[in-house]
Amino acid sequence: MFRNIKILLITLAVIAVVGGTYAFADANTIAPSAAGYATSTVSGYDVTAIVYDLNASDPTLVDKITFTVAPTSGSVVAALVKVKTSAGGTWKDCTLVAGTPPAMSVTCTYTSPTLALADITALNVVASSTTDPAPE
């Protein structure tokens, strides 16, 4: 008789744990998001139509870099895009304008400091479907 009570208690404990785990898993909902970074193919976003807009009076300077960023799958649009044009360079914030959905047109403007064409050794692009969180 005592053995049957132990088995019953163990069974009830297992059912309680499994039920609790299911309840917590069911309550977690995460919105779709995407992000990508690298100089080669990255899951998250495709970067296409890259244009280096040269300065009209000094073609050794780049006024802006424009391109299109679109999700590799789904419809999660980019909300934040940054570029870096050299290994030791700094990240530059870019402006996004809605293009053909879900693609975004991206413009990275260089006025002060200017960007010398000779200093461009790479084009690293970071794209995210969420913006940076506010500083605490």
Image: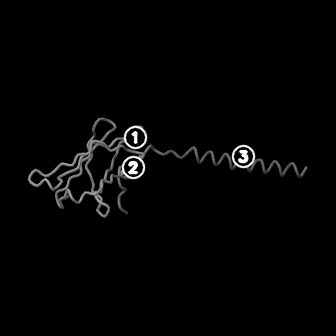
SS under mark 1: loop
Q: Do the residues bearing badges 1 and 2 touch, measured as CB atoms within 8 Å?
A: yes
Residue found farthest to the left:
57
Q: How is the rendered protein coloured?
A: one colour
Q: Amino acid at mark 3?
A: Ile
Q: Nearer the viewer, mark 2 or mark 3?
A: 2
Q: Amino acid at mark 1?
A: Thr
- Name the residue carrying label 2: 36
Q: Indicate the quadrant containing the C terminus: top left, top right, bottom left or bottom right.
A: bottom left
- Marks 2 and 3 sit apart, C-alpha to C-alpha, by 41 Å
Residue 15, label in figure = 3
Q: Position of residue 84 (x, y in %)?
A: 30, 57
- Name the residue carrying label 1: 72
Vertical position of residue 90 compared to residue 106: above or below = below
Chain-order first, disc 2 or disc 3: 3
Q: Position of residue 32 (x, y in %)?
A: 44, 43
Residue 81, label in figure = none
Say few, some or many: other residues with alpha carbon within 10 Å of mark 1 (under 14 / 14 to 19 / 20 or more).
Answer: some
Say few, some or many: other residues with alpha carbon within 10 Å of mark 2 (under 14 / 14 to 19 / 20 or more).
Answer: many
Chain-order first, disc 1 or disc 2: 2
- Marks 1 and 3 sit apart, C-alpha to C-alpha, by 42 Å
